[in-house]
Image (spheres, helix red, strand yellow):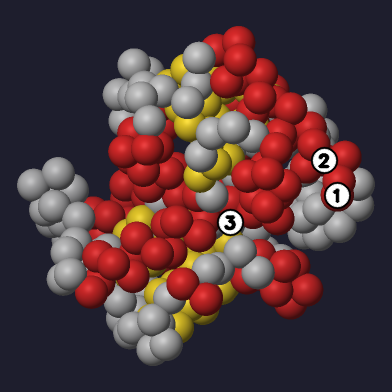
Amino acid sequence: MRIKYIVPFPLDKEGLAARAMGVPRAHLAADTIVDVVGVRDSVDVNVAEAGRSAYEALILELYVCDAGLSAEDEGYDAVVIDTVSDSGLRPLRSRLGIPVVGPGASSYAIATLLGRRFSIITYRDVDRHFAEKNIDAYKLWHHCASIRAAGVEPDFHRLFAANREQSFERLAQAARQAIEEDGADTIVLGSTTMFEAIPHMRTHVAAPVVNPGALAVKIAEMLVQFDLQQSRLAFPPPASIQDEKLQIGREPTD
């Protein structure tokens, strides 16, 4: 089995290797291969408050789609999108005949199995809109106790290379506040890049803590094993394939 794991930023080898550490290889079958690949381009994450606008969200969506369009032809059995924003999820589910899994949808579904009300922990207030968009789309506000920002500046290249323990504790503190003040009984990490904080949070938070990226990969593997794909009733295939119109910046072919 081969899974294409699409990182929504054009990272170098070091950056991709850091993201690959979040793949739960110890929990996957021996014959499951996960290829961690970056997109050709994306929003500029070095700009303060990058990603807060609908304009930037569209750019994320387009380049994730661009990277995923060829997955089936490349021989992959499933696609996982390495962002809790689930950018590109719905278009790729429509375009591809193999399972396409988003960490946001996956983690919220599992959270509703583990408890009654979950809270999402984001890095910053500016990141809230991605979670709000998905909770709206998935009609889950009755299950969502809150969305809390931890006040941690993300580094999508090096992850928690700096200020590790301080950042972990801020995430844990936000989770504890969600439990004590908002009534959450389950915590969902608001970014796939937070996986390094899982051991600390599970020790310092009195509720299940859902790790979205790892969970999405495992769910993708399970869907392939059970020969399940997204419903064509929910995600109808396109009337005609027009991938060239979505391949941003590529030279047109005759």
Determine the residue located farthest toward the right in the rendered image. Answer: 163
10 Å neighbourhood of mark 2: few (<14), some, or many (≥20)?
Answer: many
Determine the residue located farthest toward the bottom in the rendered image. Answer: 31
Q: Nearer the viewer, residue 181 or 10?
A: 181
**Label 3 SS:** loop
Q: Tell me the amino acid under the disc marked 1.
A: Arg
Q: Tell me the amino acid under the disc marked 2.
A: Ser
Whether residue 13 appears in this view of the structure is yes
Q: Name the side, left or right, on which 132 lies relative to 105.
A: right
Q: Residue 28, position in %: x, y?
A: 43, 76
Which image quarter is the C terminus in?
Answer: bottom left
Q: Which residue is mark 2?
A: 167
Q: Which residue is mark 1?
A: 164
Q: Which residue is mark 3?
A: 8
Residue at the location (55% across, 12% down)? 182
Which image quarter is the N terminus in?
Answer: bottom left
Above or below for 25 versus 10: below
Q: Name the side, left or right, on which 181 lies relative to 173.
A: left
Residue at the location (64% across, 28% down)? 175
Residue at the location (28% across, 67% down)? 222
Classify residue 23 by image quadrant: bottom right
**Label 2 SS:** helix
Q: Are marks 1 and 2 in contact (CB under 8 Å)?
A: yes
Q: Nearer the viewer, residue 31 or 51?
A: 31
Residue at the location (14% across, 44% down)? 234
**Label 1 SS:** helix
